[in-house]
Image: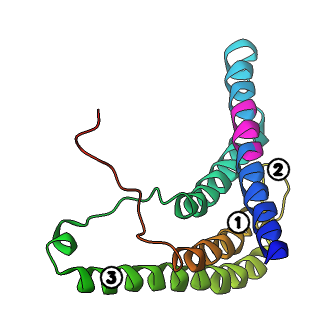
Amino acid sequence: MKVLKTTKMILDRLLLLLALIALAAMLIVIIYQVFSRQFFSSTPSWSEELSRLLFVWVSFLGIAYGFKEKLHIALGLFVNMLPKKVQDIFDYFAKALVIFFGVIMIYYGWNFTTLMSNNIMPGTGLPSSALYIVIPISGFYVTLYGIELLFKKGMHQEYDVSEG
């Protein structure tokens, strides 16, 4: 069990590290792009494409991190009116959908990544698969966190309206 917890902790830190590096790199590229446009009246051809690629990476990794931290929006008004047992059924159904969504992301994301591996992005010269490989990576994390959610109560953080 200790090995499993250690592995998960390493995977969690890797996700956060990847997202933070991509976010920092995107910020640096955009600052450089604006600086060069304002002071040199010229924008590097690779900067817009690279910032878009990094934005996609941050977005997809953020989806997975949102499941880990239970940050996604819940519309529980209808479900909260139901009996507790029915609420639990809806809770497990939602968690099963998250896992299913993660598996779909892995399967079709990998297929699309391999399909696009022969295409080249013109600005950076990188293969298009560099953009799309984040889909199965994010799908792996969504599946992992969906399975983890099965062993936790609820899918979303509880907020007390009276606090504030």
Which badge, 1 or 2, is on the more N-terminal residue? 2
Task: Say few, some or many: other residues with alpha carbon within 10 Å of mark 3 (under 14 / 14 to 19 / 20 or more).
Answer: some
What residue do we see at 55% from left, 61% from top? 63
Element assignment for label 2: loop
Q: Which residue is mark 2?
A: 124
In the rendering, at what x and y percent does residue 148 appear? 59, 75
In the rendering, at what x and y percent does residue 35 appear? 71, 19
In the rendering, at what x and y percent does residue 5 appear? 77, 70
Q: Amino acid at mark 3?
A: Asp
Side of 117 where 144 appears, left or right: left
| C-alpha distance separating marks 2 and 3 | 49 Å
- Residue extent of the magenta highlight: 21-28
> Front-most of 123 and 59?
59
Which badge, 1 or 3, is on the more N-terminal residue? 3
In the rendering, at what x and y percent does residue 54 appear? 70, 49
Label number found at residue 134: 1
Question: Residue 112, can we see it?
Answer: yes
Q: Amino acid at mark 2?
A: Thr
Q: Is residue 73 above or below residue 109?
A: above
Q: Which residue is mark 3?
A: 88
Q: Quadrant of residue 158?
A: bottom left
